[in-house]
Amino acid sequence: MGQSLSEPKTEKKTEKFENVQFSVGSSSMQGWRLEMEDAHSVELGFAQDPESAYFAVFDGHGGAKFAQLCGSRLSHYLETDSAFRSGDYSTALSNSFLSIDKDLQEEQELQTELGGTTAIVVLVRDNMIYCANAGDSRAVACVAGRVKELSFDHKPYNQGEQARIFRAGGWVEFNRVNGNLALSRAIADFNFKRNPDLPQAEQIVTANPEVIAVDVTPDHEFIVLACDGQLKG
């Protein structure tokens, strides 16, 4: 973690997606990192549920592996979850984060991987916006010209996060989990999820997302999902 190039790679990959309801743009740049560690995903309708729209950003750390895997797999976990099929979208989002985290931890070829990824997901369905967040990527909506936060950073120094870290046997040093990780929720980072006596949601670092649901109104103009740093300052 933290290694960088002597000069940033500034070439941007930009894409556009559209249907009758949504116009979506995405852009990514490697920057100073040794490799592109971030990923994103756009689904303007699922195969079994064309009314849903899914948008996600994954900010990897310690390598690109887990961001890429989440970018290609997480939407499938969501749309096939039983809670999704019954219309309980908040629960389905939570289930999908925890399920992919569990399955990745059990994959034999990933046993030596030390990195992880944030995950910020927005699902739009039935005139509702559901935002699920694990980590410090962000989602904001523009509502009548004003910024409305759809997520909040999960940092080790936050009181609630720190309490869970301590209960699970971890500590916070230099505002980092065990002096190492600068966020307190993430997919993967399995070195912090080794306590067999605790459920997933109570590990030192957890993939359990915080889910916020809001009504779509005529004042909603657009939503931005971005990696750490893009919406700060």
Image (cartoon, rainbow, N blue to C red):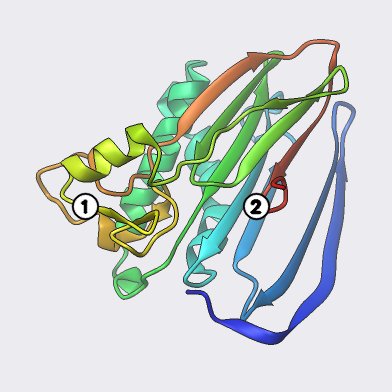
Mark 2 element type? loop
Mark 1: give few (<14), some (14-19) or many (20+) Cα within 10 Å: some
- Residue at image location 37% in from the left, 72% down from the top: 113
Compared with 226, 214 (above or below) is above
**Disc ID at residue 227:** 2
- Where does label 1 land, which residue? 170
Quarter of image, res 59: bottom right
Mark 2: give few (<14), some (14-19) or many (20+) Cα within 10 Å: many
**Disc ID at residue 133:** none
Is residue 200 visible in this depiction of the protein?
Answer: no
**Is 144 situated left or right of 77 in this image?**
right
Mark 1 or 2: the one toward you: 1
Is residue 93 visible in this depiction of the protein?
Answer: yes
**Residue nearest the viewer, comparing 41 with 229:** 229
- Residue at image location 19% in from the left, 56% down from the top: 194
- Residue at image location 62% in from the left, 78% down from the top: 35
x, y percent for residue 187: 42, 52
**Is 61 situated left or right of 159 in this image?**
right
- Residue at image location 72% in from the left, 47% down from the top: 233
x, y percent for residue 176: 38, 57
